[in-house]
Amino acid sequence: MVGKFLLVSTEVAIALSLTCLAQSGSELTAPARIHIEDRTPAPDRMLDMPPLPKGQVSLIAGTVARIDPIRDRMVVRAFGGRDITIDFDVRTAVLRGTTPASSRDLRPGTRVYADTILKDGRTFAKTVRIAGNASSGETRGQVISYDPSKKLLKVRDIISSQPFSLRLNAVTEVRSNGQPVQPGELIIGTLVHVVFRSGFEGANSAQKIDILARPGSTFTFSGRILVVDLRDDHLTLAENASETTFEVGLDSLTSGAKLRLKEGMEVLVQARFDGNKYEAQSVEPLPSSKLSTPQ
């Protein structure tokens, strides 16, 4: 009786095993339900963007101080030492020389030249050119000293405030107002724009030096006011002749004269370079019928 019970139990166990195996096999062979994710390419963001407004293009040159990739904006420390916030987006052309680059290449310390317009009251970059040639460069700075016996010029970079040395040679061009001048014109405090070539062991060879301003020099500018900042007593002017922007101090003007200045005004500015900045001596409205030419 016990043997018969064991036999029945064994048959039941085998039957149950076969049933489970059949069920398992059916599960293994059953077609799986696969979720197919929609891989349709996202539309190009450029197609969602309206065309950029047309307007006067202003060149801003400087070094990237901060970059905000989330808000698509960067802070550029421009000539004169002032920080300027510049917006950009997918419509901004980023170039390294003539080669297309990416906004990811815009990092703190990168020297850039931005063609900008005013968009919704903010400065927007249409094109950003990255200075990418390591063997050559250019800078704006202020002369610290010049040793004619060694032909050694020391310049303090306006953006970084760091001094560096440049060696003049027989092919170095020194110009003022587009005319050749002697290196002796490089007196202390002079603002210069220098194109140089890097050499071995940090020796920089000056290729071209343009004298921008000497202490005590006076200048006449004509252009459109972009910004009036009465807290810091300065205005930002877009010069008509060169489409470049620069800052002019307003300390010498009366309160009434400052209050008459409005953004968008075409003005004629008489300014004096005091060794640190341009200081306005007078700012007068420029009639629209009057041609804007450099004085």
Image (tube, rainbow, N blue to C red):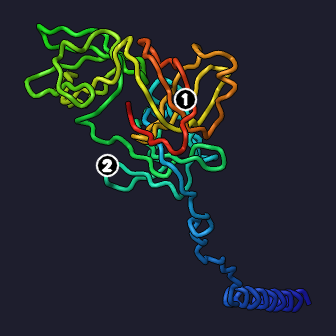
x and y percentages locating residue 211 in the rendered image? 29, 23
Is 51 in front, or is 68? Answer: 51
Residue at the extreme right of the image, as rendered: 1
Above-or-below relation of 83 to 265: above
Apparent side of residue 169 relative to residue 22 in the rendered image (left or right): left
Give the class, few, some or many, for how many residues have Cα within 10 Å of label 2's Cα (few <14, many ≥20): few
Q: Amino acid at mark 2?
A: Gly
- The residue nearer to you, when weighing 20 against 101, is 101
Left or right: 93 in relation to 255: left
Q: 91 or 8: which is nearer to us?
A: 91
For mark 1, what is the residue? 83
How would you rate the neighbour count of disc 1 (Cα within 10 Å): few for under 14, some for 14-19, many for 20 or more? some
User: Mark 1 falls on what kind of element?
Assistant: strand
Mark 2 or mark 1, earlier in chain: 1
Q: What is the quadrant of residue 37 in the picture? A: bottom right
Look at the image and tell me in which quarter the N terminus lies.
bottom right
Q: Which residue is mark 2?
A: 97
Looking at the picture, does residue 278 appear above or below residue 45? Answer: above
| Label 2 residue SS | loop
Q: What's the mark number on residue 121?
A: none
Q: Is residue 273 left or right of residue 90?
A: left
Residue 271 appears in the rendering: yes
- Report how far apart the C-alphas of labels 2 and 1 lie in the structure: 24 Å
Residue 207 placement: quadrant? top left
Q: Position of residue 125 (x, y in %)?
A: 51, 48
